[in-house]
Amino acid sequence: MPKKLRVLEGMDVYLPDTDGVINALHNYSLNLYKRVDLTVMAPKHRGHIDNQAYRIIRCRSLRVPIIDNYYGLPSRDSKFKQRLLREDYDIIHIHSPFAMLRFGLKLARKKGIPIVATFHSDMRTIFKSMFFFNWIVNALVNRIGKLYNQVDEVFCISSLVEEQLRSYGYTGKVTYLPYGTDFARSNKVEELWEEGNQKFDLENEETLFIFVGRIMKLKRIDFILESLKIVKENGYKFKFKIVGKGPETRILKRKVKELKLENEVCFLGFIPREDFPALYARGDLLLFPSLYDNFGLVKVEAAAFATAGLFIENSCAGDGIIDGVNGYLAANNPEAFASKIIEAIKDKEKLRQVGLKAWEDVYISWDECSQQLLKRLEAIVLDKKAQKEKVSA
């Protein structure tokens, strides 16, 4: 094995677009590029010039208006293909199950190197929101499963996510690897609390709920709003700050008016990264009822600032959360979610203790996650070489 492992990472969409999976690959790359010889293959994005510390090679792409992303077309870019065929790599790691995975599989076969994939998102949920007929959904899911069955190993976050992966028909090896945050575990929460009051126009005693993520139907922000209407009807005062942008923003703003929550709810859009510590520290509770997310990086970010989250019980996003200990879990209906919110804010001292336990239990840094990933990549490369030597002996 060379002094530095030569790693080729890839994804169908990438920066400057943003979502949790892009964030994961970007942070892996930021923490790996000094330890390995790293290259990221990604789609071209009109008008974007890369300025990352790590190397990115862009391929031909197609803008998909419905998701407002540029989607990679690596197999249709002859210069891109020839460039990667000329270069030497020890292992390929793909983060999405479409064109980049198909291209990666062909490239790995030609070079005789291992290829692995990370199973980030349950595409079945997305397909169900797009197609009326189950046979179409099942056909697409089975197609993804067949692609995964051609890789050497798949990484995922937990046993719950592995169950999803197995339902696609995947029969190979699985390794659990965690996701983290680039924020350090904060010891200045009280100072940041005051800063949050100033930055987000809050009184010291006001209860603040927060949501951070893409504003899309699968995130279930409408579910949060319905729950908060019940909380308000029970006589509780609060503010709810929504951070992010997305296709559902206009619809949700109308829903806020319909539910008469205009005085409580504020859409902040994108905020500077340097403002997140004050937001998380000031938040009393992160609200995250997603059934789509296989993890939810925001729960680790919030935990860095001793803020607990509320999730749906038995959801992948809530995996690792013990209700009332390091976070909160509720049944999957607005009434139960509202009831759990009320339970949390009625006892602010316990809520603070739950946040501190999240700070201890839920937090993990991307640096630590990247070290675990690198250890596994090195082991897979060594195993592959040993298999080749055994065959040729």
Image (tube, rainbow, N blue to C red):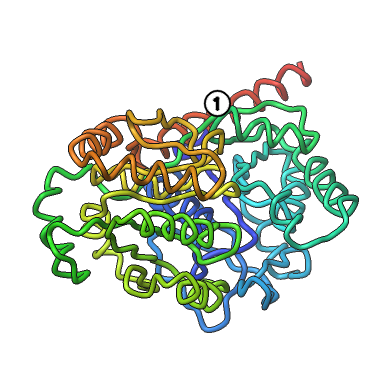
- Front-most of 333 and 268? 333
- Front-most of 138 and 179? 138
Q: Position of residue 244 (x, y in %)?
A: 43, 68
Q: Residues within 10 Å of mark 1 (few under 14, many from 20)?
A: few
- Front-most of 339 and 95? 339
Residue ID at (19%, 59%):
206
Q: Position of residue 84 (x, y in %)?
A: 66, 58
From the viewer's perspective, tell me whether residue 166 is left or right of residue 157. Answer: right
Q: Quadrant of residue 387?
A: top right
Compared to residue 121, the image places residue 244 above or below, namely: below
Instruction: Count numbered badges in the picture.
Output: 1
Residue ID at (47%, 69%):
259
| Quadrant the C terminus occupies | top right
From the viewer's perspective, tell me whether residue 298 is left or right of residue 159. Answer: left
Residue ID at (43%, 60%):
229
Q: Position of residue 131 (x, y in %)?
A: 81, 61
Q: Furthest residue to the bottom?
A: 47
Compared to residue 372, the image places residue 52 above or below, namely: below
Q: Position of residue 282 (x, y in %)?
A: 21, 55
From the viewer's perspective, tell me whether residue 350 is left or right of residue 154. Answer: left
Under mark 1, the amino acid is: Ala
Q: Which residue is mark 1?
A: 379
From the viewer's perspective, tell me whether residue 92 is left or right of residue 27. Answer: right
Residue ID at (66%, 46%):
122
Q: Secondary structure at mark 1?
A: helix
Q: Furthest residue to the right?
A: 135
Compared to residue 53, the image places residue 187 above or below, namely: above
